């Protein structure tokens, strides 16, 4: 009899745990998200909220994690466009009827890169949205985001290694290698994007000279208000084929998760 009572006790304890778990998932409502998002001047707030509402109706949707991410996006530095882009990626995932947990995790990664590291992530977001349009598998999209983030960090590290760095807007340019932040970020974005496109297209990391030529040509085509001829020369004079091979090999060695 005592044994039966023990099993009954365990049964009700299990039921209680399951109930509490479901309560946690359901504790965030669409109104909570609406209040948080009202702090951001979004252009597609209705679409994002509609997707979140759909997610909240699904079993196992990580509502608390999504709400934490939304709150984080409101408080961190970074452009509204990039923050909205992160939310749009998650909305697109839900709209496609795909599980959103992995993309929410990528959202935290992108938010950290934007807010804590000051990395320009807009190109990654646009590339990921393009992959959705191309009907790429969700796992490939999530991996692609991780690899593009890795490349941003790796290319920034390479530029620092070569003594190329950024200074805040308006600060004096004390060295030819000290670039105003917008120019530095544009170089960082374009170089990492070209390496990513090269690898996505099946390019060999061992063809470093080919990759270097593509990078230089891309920068030369983009000369204008942001990228200057002196910036192109700076990259041409300092970044070698072996540098880019090293970065490309490191990117390819990243776990597929």
Image: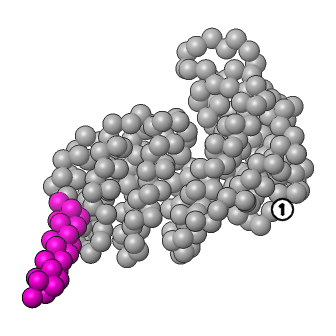
Quadrant location of the N terminus in the rendered image: bottom left
Magenta part mainly helix, strand or loop? helix
Question: Which residue is under mark 1?
Answer: 204
Instruction: Give the residue at x 53% y 36%.
Output: 117
Residue farthest to the front, as pictured = 2
Q: Does residue 8 appear anywhere in the picture? A: no
Q: Which residues are magenta?
A: 1-27
140 on left or right of 14:
right
Q: Between residue 6 and residue 57, name the one nearer to us.
A: 6
Quadrant location of the C terminus in the rendered image: bottom right
Q: Secondary structure at mark 1?
A: loop
Instruction: Give the residue at x 45% y 37%.
Output: 115
Q: Position of residue 198 (x, y in %)?
A: 75, 58
Q: Position of residue 241 (x, y in %)?
A: 88, 45
Instruction: Give the residue at x 48% y 36%.
Output: 116
In the depicted structure, whether residue 186 falls above or below residue 6: above
Q: Position of residue 251 (x, y in %)?
A: 71, 55
Q: Is residue 32 magenta?
A: no
In the depicted structure, whether residue 166 falls above or below residue 232: above
181 on left or right of 74:
right
Q: Is residue 3 magenta?
A: yes
Q: Does residue 25 appear anywhere in the picture? A: yes
217 on left or right of 101:
right
Q: Between residue 219 and residue 199, name the one nearer to us.
A: 199
Q: Position of residue 88 (x, y in %)?
A: 40, 57
Q: Between residue 122 and residue 141, name the one nearer to us.
A: 141
Instruction: Give the residue at x 64% y 30%.
Output: 183
Colour treatment of the image: one colour
Q: Between residue 15 and residue 67, name the one nearer to us.
A: 15
Q: Residues within 10 Å of mark 1 (few under 14, many from 20)?
A: some
């Amino acid at each position: 009899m005592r044994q039966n009572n023990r099993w009954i006790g365990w049964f009700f304890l299990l039921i209680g745990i399951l109930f509490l778990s479901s309560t946690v998932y359901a504790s965030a409502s669409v109104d909570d998200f609406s209040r948080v998002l009202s702090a951001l001047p979004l252009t597609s707030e209705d679409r994002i909220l509609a997707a979140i509402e759909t997610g909240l109706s699904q079993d196992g949707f990580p509502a608390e994690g999504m709400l934490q991410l939304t709150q984080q996006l409101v408080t961190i530095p970074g452009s509204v466009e990039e923050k909205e882009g992160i939310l749009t990626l998650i909305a697109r995932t839900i709209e496609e009827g795909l599980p959103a947990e992995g993309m929410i995790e990528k959202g935290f990664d992108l938010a950290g890169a934007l807010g804590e590291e000051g990395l320009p992530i807009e190109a990654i977001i646009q590339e990921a949205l393009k992959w959705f349009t191309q009907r790429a598998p969700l796992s490939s999209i999530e991996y692609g985001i991780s690899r593009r983030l890795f490349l941003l960090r790796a290319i920034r590290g390479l530029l620092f290694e070569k003594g190329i760095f950024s200074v805040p807007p308006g600060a004096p340019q004390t060295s030819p290698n000290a670039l105003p932040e917008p120019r530095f970020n544009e170089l960082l974005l374009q170089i990492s994007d070209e390496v990513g496109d090269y690898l996505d297209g099946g390019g060999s990391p061992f063809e470093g000279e080919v990759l270097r030529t593509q990078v230089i040509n891309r920068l030369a085509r983009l000369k204008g208000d942001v990228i200057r001829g002196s910036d192109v020369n700076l990259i041409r004079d300092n970044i070698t084929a072996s540098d880019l091979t090293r970065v490309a090999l490191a990117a390819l060695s990243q776990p597929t998760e």
